[in-house]
Image (cartoon, rainbow, N blue to C red):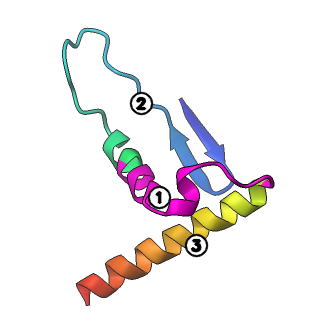
Amino acid sequence: MVYLARSALLAIVKRPRHTQGFQVLQWRWIVERMFGWLHRLQRLSKDFEVVPATTETWIRIAMIHLMVRHLTARA
Protein backbone atom coordinates (compact mmCIF):
# COMPACT_ATOMS: atom_id res chain seq x y z
CA MET A 1 0.00 0.00 0.00
CA VAL A 2 1.19 3.49 -0.74
CA TYR A 3 -0.16 6.64 0.88
CA LEU A 4 0.62 10.29 0.18
CA ALA A 5 0.57 12.40 3.36
CA ARG A 6 1.33 16.08 2.75
CA SER A 7 4.53 15.92 0.72
CA ALA A 8 5.84 12.58 2.04
CA LEU A 9 5.29 9.22 0.39
CA LEU A 10 4.41 6.43 2.81
CA ALA A 11 4.73 2.83 1.64
CA ILE A 12 3.71 -0.05 3.90
CA VAL A 13 6.08 -2.98 3.43
CA LYS A 14 4.70 -6.36 4.49
CA ARG A 15 6.72 -9.44 5.30
CA PRO A 16 6.73 -12.12 2.56
CA ARG A 17 4.35 -15.00 3.38
CA HIS A 18 6.71 -17.95 3.13
CA THR A 19 9.64 -16.60 5.17
CA GLN A 20 10.77 -18.04 8.46
CA GLY A 21 12.91 -16.34 11.05
CA PHE A 22 14.42 -12.88 10.78
CA GLN A 23 14.49 -11.08 7.45
CA VAL A 24 15.43 -7.45 6.86
CA LEU A 25 12.50 -5.58 5.35
CA GLN A 26 13.03 -2.87 2.75
CA TRP A 27 13.32 0.65 4.25
CA ARG A 28 12.20 -0.43 7.72
CA TRP A 29 15.63 0.00 9.30
CA ILE A 30 15.81 3.59 8.03
CA VAL A 31 12.60 4.52 9.83
CA GLU A 32 13.60 2.72 13.03
CA ARG A 33 17.01 4.43 12.97
CA MET A 34 15.31 7.83 12.64
CA PHE A 35 13.01 7.09 15.59
CA GLY A 36 16.06 6.10 17.62
CA TRP A 37 17.74 9.41 16.78
CA LEU A 38 14.60 11.35 17.72
CA HIS A 39 14.25 9.61 21.08
CA ARG A 40 17.73 10.75 22.04
CA LEU A 41 16.20 14.20 22.52
CA GLN A 42 14.88 14.15 26.09
CA ARG A 43 11.86 16.30 25.25
CA LEU A 44 10.64 13.77 22.66
CA SER A 45 11.18 10.67 24.79
CA LYS A 46 7.77 11.11 26.44
CA ASP A 47 4.57 12.76 25.24
CA PHE A 48 4.53 15.88 27.43
CA GLU A 49 2.94 18.27 24.96
CA VAL A 50 -0.79 19.00 24.90
CA VAL A 51 -0.91 20.65 21.48
CA PRO A 52 0.15 18.40 18.56
CA ALA A 53 1.69 21.38 16.76
CA THR A 54 4.19 21.75 19.61
CA THR A 55 5.31 18.14 19.26
CA GLU A 56 5.62 18.60 15.49
CA THR A 57 7.77 21.68 16.06
CA TRP A 58 10.08 19.80 18.45
CA ILE A 59 10.43 16.99 15.90
CA ARG A 60 11.39 19.55 13.24
CA ILE A 61 13.95 21.10 15.60
CA ALA A 62 15.41 17.67 16.35
CA MET A 63 15.66 16.81 12.64
CA ILE A 64 17.33 20.15 11.88
CA HIS A 65 19.81 19.42 14.66
CA LEU A 66 20.52 15.96 13.18
CA MET A 67 20.94 17.29 9.65
CA VAL A 68 23.32 20.04 10.76
CA ARG A 69 25.34 17.55 12.80
CA HIS A 70 25.63 15.17 9.84
CA LEU A 71 26.53 17.94 7.41
CA THR A 72 29.25 19.36 9.67
CA ALA A 73 30.72 15.88 10.23
CA ARG A 74 31.25 15.45 6.48
CA ALA A 75 32.82 18.89 5.96
* Element class at badge 1: helix
Vertical placement of 43 versus 30: above or below? below
42 in magenta:
yes
Query: Would residue 23 appear left or right of 10 to someone viewing this image?
Result: left
Q: Which residues are magenta?
A: 33-51
Image side of residue 16 versus residue 11, left or right = left
Residue 13 numbered mark, or none: 2
Residue 3 on image: x %, y %: 61, 38
Q: Earlier in the sequence, mark 1 or mark 3?
A: 1
Label 3 element class: helix
Q: Nearer the viewer, mark 2 or mark 1?
A: 1
Q: Is residue 46 magenta?
A: yes
Q: Residue at x 44, y 50 (%)?
A: 35
Task: Return the residue at label 1.
Answer: 38
User: Identity of the amino acid at label 2?
Assistant: Val
Which numbered disc flags the more N-terminal residue, 2 or 1? 2
- Front: mark 2 or 3: 3
Residue type, label 1? Leu
Q: Quadrant of residue 27?
A: top left
What residue is disc 3 on? 61
